[in-house]
C-alpha cells in the first residue's frame, strides 16, 4: 500500500510542474517583444510605428532579383515559363493607361489606411520606387483617386488610370 500513495504523490508533483511550466510558457509567448513595443512620444502617448517605418525602407533594385526570375522557386523544372509573343494584345504598359496622353509609370502597389493614401510606382526616369500620396504630383500629374488596385492621375483636365497587373 505504500507504493500507491507514493505514486500519487509523484503524479501530483509532475502535474504541478507541468502546469507551472505551461503557465510560464504561456506568459512568455503572449508578451510583446521589446522591439515591437511602442515607445512613449513627446506627449507621453505611445507612438504608433508602422507605415512610416515601411516608407523609410529603401528596397533593392528589381535587378537584384534576377536569379529568382531565372530559376523560379516554385517551378518543378526551375525554368522560367515560356513567353509567347501575341501581336493581338497590346503591351502590358499600354493596357494600364486609359488616356492618349501617357504617364510613364507602372503601378506596383496601393496603400490605403485611415491616415494615409499612397501609390507605389515604378517610374523609368527614377532610380528607385516612388511613393506618391493623394494630392501630390508626379511628372506634372496629380494623384486624385486610389482604389484597391487602381490609381487615377489628372493633368489639365485629362485623366489617366493605372491598374495593378496581376501576373500568375
Image (cartoon, rainbow, N blue to C red):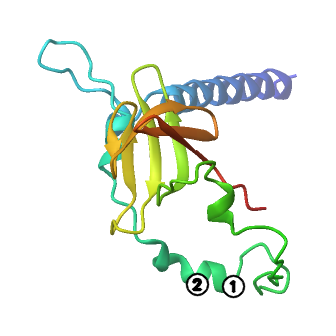
Query: x, y percentage for residue 108?
Result: 54, 54
Residue at 33% x, 47% y is: 140
Q: In the image shown, does 138 or 30 lie closer to the viewer?
A: 138
In the rendered image of this protein, does residue 23 appear above or below residue 55? above
Residue at 79% x, 62% y is: 168
Residue at 47% x, 40% y is: 153
- Label 2 near label 1: C-beta < 8 Å? yes
Quarter of the image with the N terminus is: top right
Residue 86 in which image quadrant: bottom right
Residue 17 in which image quadrant: top right
Q: Residue 120 bears which disc, if any?
A: none
In the rendered image of this protein, does residue 57 appear above or below residue 32? below
Q: Residue 71 bears which disc, if any?
A: 1
In the rendered image of this protein, does residue 48 appear above or below residue 104? above
Q: In the image shown, does 71 or 152 lie closer to the viewer?
A: 152
Query: x, y percentage for residue 105?
Result: 48, 58
In the rendered image of this protein, does residue 9 appear above or below residue 98? above
Q: Residue 67 bears which disc, if any?
A: 2
Query: x, y percentage for residue 163?
Result: 63, 47
**Does dot 1 land on a helix, a strand or a loop?**
loop
Amino acid at each position: 500500500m505504500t507504493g500507491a500513495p507514493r505514486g500519487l504523490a509523484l503524479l501530483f508533483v509532475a502535474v504541478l510542474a507541468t502546469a507551472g511550466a505551461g503557465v510560464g510558457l504561456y506568459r512568455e509567448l503572449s508578451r510583446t517583444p521589446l522591439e515591437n513595443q511602442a515607445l512613449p512620444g513627446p506627449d507621453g502617448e505611445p507612438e504608433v510605428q508602422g507605415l512610416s517605418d515601411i516608407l523609410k525602407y529603401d528596397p533593392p533594385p528589381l535587378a537584384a532579383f534576377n536569379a529568382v526570375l531565372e530559376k523560379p522557386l516554385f517551378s518543378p523544372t526551375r525554368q522560367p515559363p515560356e513567353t509567347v509573343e501575341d501581336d493581338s494584345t497590346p503591351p502590358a504598359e499600354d493596357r494600364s493607361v486609359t488616356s492618349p496622353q501617357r504617364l510613364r509609370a507602372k503601378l506596383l502597389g496601393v496603400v490605403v489606411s485611415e491616415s494615409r493614401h499612397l501609390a507605389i510606382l515604378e517610374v523609368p526616369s527614377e532610380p528607385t520606387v516612388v511613393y506618391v500620396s493623394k494630392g501630390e504630383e508626379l511628372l506634372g500629374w496629380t494623384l486624385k483617386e486610389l482604389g484597391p488596385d487602381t490609381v487615377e492621375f489628372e493633368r489639365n483636365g485629362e485623366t489617366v488610370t493605372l491598374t495593378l497587373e496581376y501576373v500568375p
